[in-house]
Amino acid sequence: MPSRKPTRQTIAFGIALTGLREDAGLSRLELAKRIPVTRSYIGQVETGTTRCTREFAAELDKALESGTEMQDAWDDVLKTTRYPPWFADYPLAEGTASLLRAFETMFVYGLFQTPAYVRALLQDESAVEARLRRQDVLRRENPPMLSIVLLENVLWTCMGSAEIMREQCEHLLTVSEWSNVTLQVAPTGYYRGLEGAFNLATQPDGGELLYMPAARGGITTPNREDILPIVGAFSALQARALSVDDSREFLRKAVVRWT
């Protein structure tokens, strides 16, 4: 595969490979001979200038006797390159975040969507798999804190069928009880400083990445001057939204409505 400019995804995969190779006490040449490929190809994968296939990741696992670690890394990191370029960096930041904040105006927050809801929303199966794979962050040993606000019309917009919406609202009720989740419903209205939905991932070191969808594509940015106004507007939104308890009661009414 031709060499190209490294991306965050290929660099992350390369770091994982380098760590496993060094733990095994192998040089690049020794690993290359076990597969076999050229030493330079191993170097390109480790430096992120080549995006290998999943089949090659399986060959790496076999050569390194590493179970499925490289295949899992491929699924978790390189497969995210199937996302559109304006969104590709966000799943990586989301997967390592200590705090996730989001305001949703049209659809249920992605990490809280049920499989049936996802399939009703997304037509491409690879996109469905990618969306569901992102939810693995909720099953981490130390999952992130989540502060999520849904505009109330999200719950009244039928996605697929009434049965799918009932199941989705029941799932939101369950999620709202998790200790690391603050889930609120906001009455439909205008909220100053928020022109639309957004997702914000905050890392343990304080670094942040903001994703804002648009009618055509979207914007992903780490710039503080873009993020700070959103953070302030989100705090004001939380103050005007229903309380956590009142939001649960709203969700219960939604379950009844969709039954």
Image: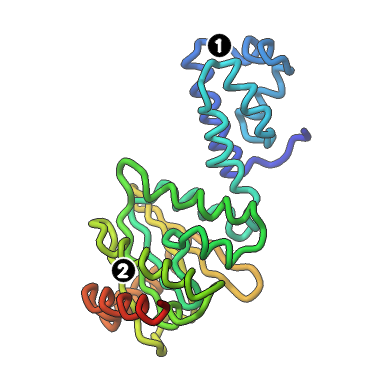
Disc 1 residue type (three-letter): Leu
Q: Position of residue 107 (x, y in %)?
A: 49, 72
Query: Is residue 226 at least partly visible in the picture?
Result: no
Res 42 visible: yes
In this rendering, the answer to whether 213 lies above or below 145 is: below
Residue position for label 2: 183
- Marks 2/1 in contact by CB < 8 Å: the verdict is no
**Disc 1, SS:** loop
Under circle 2, the secondary element is strand
Q: Residue at x 61, y 38 (%)?
A: 10
Instruction: Point out residue 99 in the picture as x, y percentages from the top left corner.
Output: 34, 56
| Rendering quarter of residue 7 | top right
Q: Nearer the viewer, mark 2 or mark 1?
A: 2
Label 1 Cα neighbours within 10 Å, binned few <14 / some 14-19 / many ≥20: some
Q: Is residue 234 left or right of residue 199?
A: left
Q: Position of residue 192 (x, y in %)?
A: 39, 86
> Real-space Cα distance between discs 2 and 1?
48 Å
Q: Residue at x 51, y 28 (%)?
A: 69
Please tell me in which quadrant of the rendered image residue 220 appears: bottom right
Q: Residue at point 74% right, 17% down?
A: 38
Instruction: From the viewer's perspective, tell me whether residue 210 is left or right of residue 74.
Output: left
